[in-house]
Image: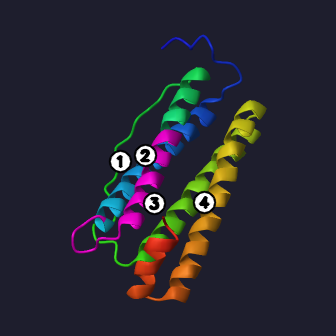
Amino acid sequence: MAQSLPRQNYHVESEAALNRQINLCLSASYAYQSMAFYFDRDDIALGNFHKYLKKLSDEHRESADKLLTYQNQRGGRAVMQDIKKPDRDEWGTGIDVMQAALNLEKAINQSFLDVHMIAEKNKDPQMCDYIEEYLEDQVARIKKHADHIASLRRNGPGLGEYLFDKHTLC
């Protein structure tokens, strides 16, 4: 295969790392969509959990789209992978899903850190700068999930979870 014309200072290791990140963002979008529609079920019916998690699904899908565009701009090739089904279909309580979301965001953040480290190792400051924008968003998202977990613990199950849904996630 001939080298892409816009490709400059774009190491194959960086390209592969970005493809892994794209797959992780798409997997996260899929997992958040599963979580969102769990809370939209008639036997759960916590509408703001649904909206909050659906928004996260959309944001991760948008991140994947932006990373795919970046991959093309740099002259790389997008290599799509299978998206694994989430580990579960039943997400439990609000605190359970927020804990799962926190763990997912930490994994995504670690992956972005790994991509940044690879770009830095390969002396690609433009890619480092690009990835740093995502790192800032990830740190904020991790803090937000941690705050939600603390609030849910303080509020308790049942009515506390219902009030969290109505007043915090709206």
Identify the residue position indicated by label 1 in the image: 83
The Cα atoms of the two marked residues, 1 and 3, are separated by 22 Å
Q: Nearer the viewer's eye, disc 4 or disc 1?
A: 4
Residue at screen point 35% across, 47% down:
83
Q: Does 159 appear above or below 125?
A: below
Q: Give the label on residue 26, or none.
A: 2
The Cα atoms of the two marked residues, 1 and 2, are separated by 7 Å
Left or right of residue 19: residue 139:
right
> Mark 3 vs mark 4: which is more N-terminal?
3
Q: Look at the image and say whether residue 142 sits in the magenta stretch.
A: no
The Cα atoms of the two marked residues, 2 and 4, are separated by 17 Å
Q: Look at the image and say whether residue 42 sits in the magenta stretch.
A: yes
Please tell me in which quadrant of the rendered image residue 50 appears: bottom left
Q: Give the label on residue 133, or none.
A: none
Image location of residue 163, percent across then percent down: 45, 79
> Mark 2 vs mark 4: which is more N-terminal?
2
Q: Nearer the viewer, residue 9 or 139?
A: 139
Q: Amino acid at mark 4?
A: Arg
Q: Main secondary structure of the magenta part?
A: helix
Q: How many marks?
A: 4
Q: Amino acid at mark 2?
A: Leu
Left or right of residue 133: residue 123:
right
Q: Nearer the viewer's eye, disc 2 or disc 4?
A: 4
Crowding near the residue tagged with mark 2, few <14, some 14–19, many ≥20 C-alpha atoms within 10 Å: many
Left or right of residue 111: residue 55:
left
Q: Nearer the viewer's eye, disc 3 or disc 2?
A: 3
